[in-house]
Amino acid sequence: MLNVLESIPYNDQTMGRRQLVSEKHLLLLQIALKPGQVVPTHNANSNVHLLVLQGSIDVTLNDAPYQAGSGSLLAVALGTSMQIRNTQAHNATFLVIKTPNPSEIKTAQLK
């Protein structure tokens, strides 16, 4: 058993990241951002849900801004351009829930 609120993977240099589950129909990651850290802009490679566990994150989806605080769940469709930032003074951690696992999605679907 793993408690996602223990040993949160914060990193002083860059975003922290750990893989929690990797199965055919699910990839579950935990991301940890210290103040000022960013998840670089990229396109969602699966259907994604972001679940904020602690803190607050600023999320940009296809140029539309959202702020998500502790307990917030944000859906992100396959192929959506996204960037995530911690602009607050406190650490933030969130789960990235991808269904299906991106390894199951054909490259053609991402174009």
Image (tube, grey):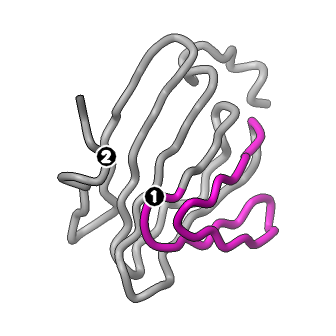
Instruction: Estimate how packed mark 2 is, as few (under 14), some (14 to 19) or many (20 or more) residues with alpha carbons within 10 Å.
Output: some
Q: How many marks?
A: 2
Image coords of residue 73 (percent x, y): 65, 53
The residue pinned by badge 1 equals 53
Picture quadrant of residue 92: bottom left
Residue placed under numbered mark 2 in the picture: 4
In what element is the residue under mark 1?
Answer: strand
30 in relation to 109, above or below: below
Q: Is residue 5 left or right of residue 68?
A: left
Please say if the residues under marks 2 and 1 sit with CB atoms less than 8 Å apart: yes
Which three-letter amino acid code belongs to the residue tagged 1?
Answer: Leu
**Figure quadrant of residue 100:** top right
Which residue shows up at 41% across the image and 81% down it?
36
Amino acid residing under circle 2: Val
Question: Which quadrant of the figure contains the C terminus?
Answer: top right
Inspect the magenta stretch and tell me whether residue 61 lies in it: yes
Alpha carbons under labels 2 and 1: distance apart: 9 Å
